[in-house]
Image (cartoon, rainbow, N blue to C red):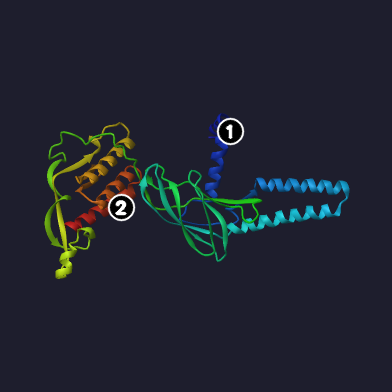
Amino acid sequence: MIAKAIQQFLLSPFQWMTARFRRWADQRSPRSSRVQLNQRRIYIVPTGSGFFWLSMVLVIFLVAVNYSNSLAYGLCFFMLSLFLLSILHTWRNLAGITLVARRAKAGFSGEIIDVVVECLSDRRARYSIGLGWPDTEVVMVSFQKDCEQTLAARAGRRGWFKPGRMRIESIYPLGLCRAWSWVRLDFHSLVYPVPDDRYPFPENQSADDGERSVVNSGFDDFAGFRNYQETDNPAHVYWKAYAKTGELLTKQFEQPSGRELCFSLDQVPGHHLEQQLSILTAWCLRCEQLHFTYGLMLPDHKLVPSLGADHLRRCLEVLALYHLEDNDISRIVNGIEKEQGENND
């Protein structure tokens, strides 16, 4: 173990030191959905302006010593005390802030997604606080009470959304010192596989293999009315009849030339699991756009053919967690099967 660490240090000292620092920072600030900034998590150093300020203090001090000038001594000590006060106030601008991970939109791997972070101010006004991740835009906020901020984060690998360390910093009030902290927030959101839309649907499928012609509920041809249900799209409600009779009716549409597809890993080209999951993701998205009924036949996990935004979300969740965390994917699949059973009843 020690020999391996020495070898890594000799090959790339900078990367070795960076990795060591990240492990040390992760131990001091473990991943959590709620993080409070205290003296263990806040770091502070002079900025470029702060170093220039200190150099000027040193120059003035040397002049004061050389010429025995009391006014120069006074100016030197005033500037030094102002710098020390800046350290305290810059630190207090961050101290006590609590960051709470509220929600994050599910997205595909590599995308920039929106996340919502709540900032609890501990009943003190905060000014010019910078929030963000290193590879995204930093948002500057000021708040006097608890508030929510929408930030942009890059989705990493498929699975549970685990963004890197978020940086929170401030140079308030004078810009002489920079106080910052790294926090790791847990948003409990999913990252779907990136779609690979280069491949067509699998061909030469029989009805037993998962493809047959069906008549799906779609948006092409008008097929009559039925009684309104709470889950119906408001755009399909026949409002004219409601104005005349007071009865809610829903318009029905049919897509005569639909298809029903059921995808499995055996039908997917490619030799790597990640590439296969990306292709399955693209096929599900394409079926949803074309109003084709589709399902998934994965080892130990089966989703019966269906259509709609909820079904697409279930398919993407299963693909996102496939072969990553069995407990989580089993929980999702069990919930899907229970929901489908209730719908059938």
Left or right: where does residue 260 sit relative to residue 72? left
- x and y, in percent, of residue 190 in the image: 36, 49
Left or right: where does residue 293 sit relative to residue 122? left
Vertical relation: 121 (above or below) 336: below
Q: What residue type is labelled 1?
A: Pro
Label 2 SS:
helix
Give me the C-alpha separation between circle 2 and circle 1: 44 Å
- x and y, in percent, of residue 213 in the image: 12, 43
Which callout, 2 or 1, points to the residue nearer the camera? 1
- x and y, in percent, of residue 316 in the image: 30, 46
Q: What residue type is labelled 2?
A: Arg
The quadrant of the rendering that contains the C terminus is bottom left
Q: Which residue is drawn at 66% across and 57% down?
A: 88
Q: Nearer the viewer, residue 82 or 161?
A: 82
Residue 324: image quadrant is: top left
Q: Which residue is drawn at 88% across and 48% down?
A: 67
Q: Residue 13 carries which label?
A: 1
Q: Which of 184 and 294 is in front in this view?
A: 294
Callout 2–callout 1 Cβ contact below 8 Å:
no
User: Is residue 194 visible to the viewer in this orientation of the structure?
Assistant: yes
Label 1 SS:
helix
Q: Which of 169 and 252 is in front in this view?
A: 252
Q: Which mark is residue 331?
A: 2
Other residues around mark 1 within 10 Å, as few (<14) / some (14–19) / many (≥20)? few
Residue 89: image quadrant is: bottom right
